[in-house]
Amino acid sequence: MSNLENLLLPVTFNNWNTYTYSPRINTILSFSPNMGAMPQDIAYLPEPPTYLFDPFGLPMDNDDLVSRCKEIDGSDDLESALENMLKDMLDIEGEPILDSNFKFTLPYAFKYSQARETSLNMFCPDYADDPWMGLLEYKTAERFDPDVTNFTYKSNIADIDLLLNEHLDQHINLIGTDNYLLAIIDEIALRRNEEVNEGDACDYFLNKPFRLLIMAAEKGLNHMMNNGYKEYKQQLLDGYKIEISHRDNITRPYPTRLFNFDFINKSSIAYDRTCDALDITPNWNLFEDWHSYQYKDCNNAEDAVVNTTVRISTGYDFTLANWNYFQQAVYDLAIEEHDNNEHNSKTFKGWLSNRR
């Protein structure tokens, strides 16, 4: 049997989702000299670490790799399925990955219900103390998500088909129109036999998540204009939950401290413990450089929440121009947790006013 002892397998206790897959933890693990990852530039939204190469030595496409993982998730014999998936792949030195001297991980969290029957080294990030962080990573892991992606005047027909029409019972035909948002609003109003001020509606739905237009098709344009954020936030959180299992055989990186702006007292300690639990050597230079970049200009917990939310969801530093409903909902979830996490309950408006 091939050797999978170098695979660090992400697992989840939720069914058919990746709430407990963390791209940031994948990046941090790649710093270790024991992990066979290609070097990458530090960024708010880095490319996934490359551990795997095809038989010609070309990096495996990350989306293709995720698709392959999804195909075998739930297999009766996950260990054999993983071996079969990996058998023709190479490591960073061109050696078969199953015989590699390097450790590696995958960009997907497998269901623990199947993985528990294996002898693999598994890990599962524990977001129990900070659900906002899990929500942020889960929703921004997809390239296109109507809860996260805003409708802008740069949105094209392909974007609209993927982020709006795919979620509607009846497709909205935009061929021949030069104002997509106005055409969408007029069509929704027509279908619902609803009178709406077109100018007000365009102003409202512009630069807000596509989800609001999807909900407007169901609940009405005027209803969403009057109750949009409340309705949006409720549906965002309704489908989100974190299930925690306290199995001793699962390594649990602790994001609440690993992703904390306090490097000395929290983040560095969590990093050391994570590496020790996964039996990899820390790379303190890379980790400190990464931490300094991620938390620049963060002097307290509120700074960290706001900047982390914006940087992970957009790839840019905070500005009012890129603060939207999704980020506000994540921030609200963070400050609502003040009784059991490390953030206090100051509002975003208070945070903003202190910086003007």
Image: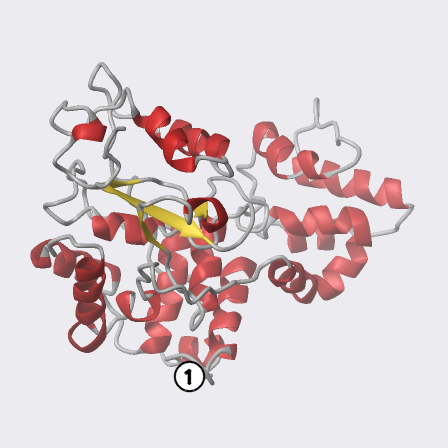
Give the quadrant of residue 240.
bottom right
Measured as percent of width and height from the top left, residue 191 is found at: 87, 40
Model colouring: secondary structure
Seen from this angle, which residue lies furthest top? Answer: 56
Is residue 220 at least partly visible in the picture? no
> Taking 113 as reference, is 1 left or right?
left
Within 10 angstroms of label 1, few (less than 14), some, or many (20 or more) residues?
some
Three-letter amino acid code at the position of disc 1: Asn
Question: Which residue was labeled with disc 1?
Answer: 344
Measured as percent of width and height from the top left, residue 245 is found at: 46, 64
Give the quadrant of residue 317.
bottom left
Quadrant where the N terminus lies?
top left
Q: Is residue 204 above or below residue 2?
A: below
Q: Give the structural element (helix, strand or loop) at label 1.
A: loop
Q: Is residue 265 above or below residue 279?
A: below
Q: Residue sitting at 53 percent across and 37 percent down?
A: 154
Give the quadrant of residue 343.
bottom left
Measured as percent of width and height from the top left, residue 168 is found at: 74, 38
Q: Nearer the viewer, residue 216 or 102?
A: 102
Q: Nearer the viewer, residue 7 or 195?
A: 7
Measured as percent of width and height from the top left, residue 262 is found at: 22, 74
Q: Residue sitting at 36 percent across and 41 percent down?
A: 107
> Taking 114 as reference, is 2 left or right?
left
Quadrant where the C terminus lies?
bottom left
> Taking 140 as reference, is 171 left or right?
right
Is residue 247 at least partly visible in the picture? yes
Seen from this angle, which residue lies furthest right? Answer: 193
